Amino acid sequence: MELKREHTLLLVDDEHAIIRALKRLFRKEGYTILTAESGPDGLEQLKQCKTPVSMIISVGIPFSLTRV
């Protein structure tokens, strides 16, 4: 499935360099970008966002997003 450019992406990663690079890449393509440094921060971003969000999550984040 191809993402449409009006989508908002939530980038979750604890590495600032990765967030900066992905943010720059996706913004150039016209996406709206939200960022979070941890699972709990990502969940908070999702709760506050009023539009549908696609997520890109680092596999290295130790906190499970399923824990609430």
Image: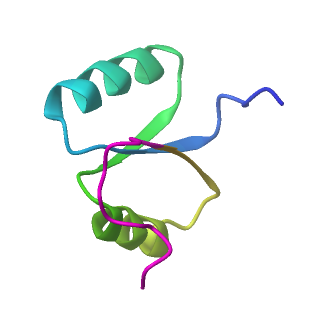
Q: Position of residue 46 (x, y in %)?
A: 47, 67
Q: Quadrant of residue 3?
A: top right
Q: Which residues are magenta?
A: 57-68
Q: Position of residue 15 (x, y in %)?
A: 18, 36
Which residue ends up furthest to the right in the rendered image?
1
Tell whether 61 sits left or right of 49: left
Which residue ends up furthest to the bottom in the rendered image?
68
Q: Position of residue 22 (x, y in %)?
A: 36, 24
- Screen quadrant of the C terminus: bottom left
Q: Is residue 16 found inside the magenta-colored segment of the image?
A: no
Tell whether 4 sits left or right of 41: right
Pick the front one: 46 or 68: 68
Q: Position of residue 48 (x, y in %)?
A: 43, 72
Q: Residue at x 73, y 30 (%)?
A: 4
Magenta: main secondary structure equals: loop
Pick the front one: 35 or 63: 63
Q: Residue at x 31, y 51 (%)?
A: 61
Tell whether 17 sits left or right of 33: left
Image color mode: rainbow
Q: Residue at x 32, y 65 (%)?
A: 63
Which residue ends up furthest to the left in the rendered image?
16
Q: Is residue 61 above or below residue 31?
A: below
Q: Residue at x 41, y 67 (%)?
A: 64
Number of labelled discs? 0
- Screen quadrant of the N terminus: top right
Q: Quadrant of residue 2?
A: top right
Pick the front one: 52 or 2: 2
